[in-house]
Amino acid sequence: QVQLVESGGGLVQPGGSLRLSCIASVSFFSLYTMEWHRQAPGKQRELVATITKSGTTNYADSVKGRFTISRDNAKKTAYLQMNSLKPEDTAVYYCKTNTDWGQGTQVTVSS
């Protein structure tokens, strides 16, 4: 089982930026595909971005051009850089790999 711990959430104004981090307690982190998901109040959890072991990335259409997923294998950490944030990005953001989830970090975009 992989333990995942997210951090970096908070309150930001529209147009602002945040960087989320996800630290994984696992051997051979570099072999894992890492994912970021989010769940807004009253909505289903949705996949936001993925990064494979080779560094290939994919994004939901709603965040393309604004969010960037990356990883640092030496630090066993995945990141989600979020720019040009909108109120509709407000959600709890979760890190996931295989079937393991982190506890989530709240992101609120509001003026």
Image: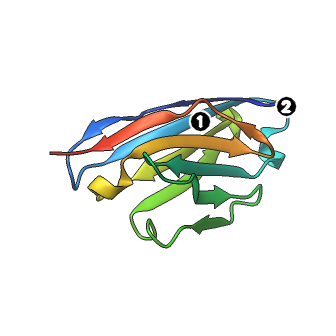
Q: Which picture quadrant has residue 95?
A: top right
Label annotation for residue 35: none
Tell me where residue 32 appears, x and y as whole percent.
79, 47
Residue sitting nearer the eye, 2 or 110:
110
Mark earlier in primary sequence (2, 1): 1
Look at discs 2 and 1 and give the one toward the viewer.
1
- Residue 42 drawn at (x, y percent): 45, 49
The residue where tag 1 is placed is: 22
Q: Is residue 85 visible?
A: no
Q: Position of residue 7 (x, y in %)?
A: 49, 30
Compared with 44, 64 (above or below) is below
How busy is the neighbourhood of tag 2: few (under 14 within 10 Å), some, or many (20 plus)? few
Q: How many marks?
A: 2
Q: Position of residue 69 (x, y in %)?
A: 55, 55
**Residue that carries the numbered disc 2 in the rendered image:** 27
Name the quadrant of the C terminus: top left
Can residue 39 be seen in the rendering of this structure? yes
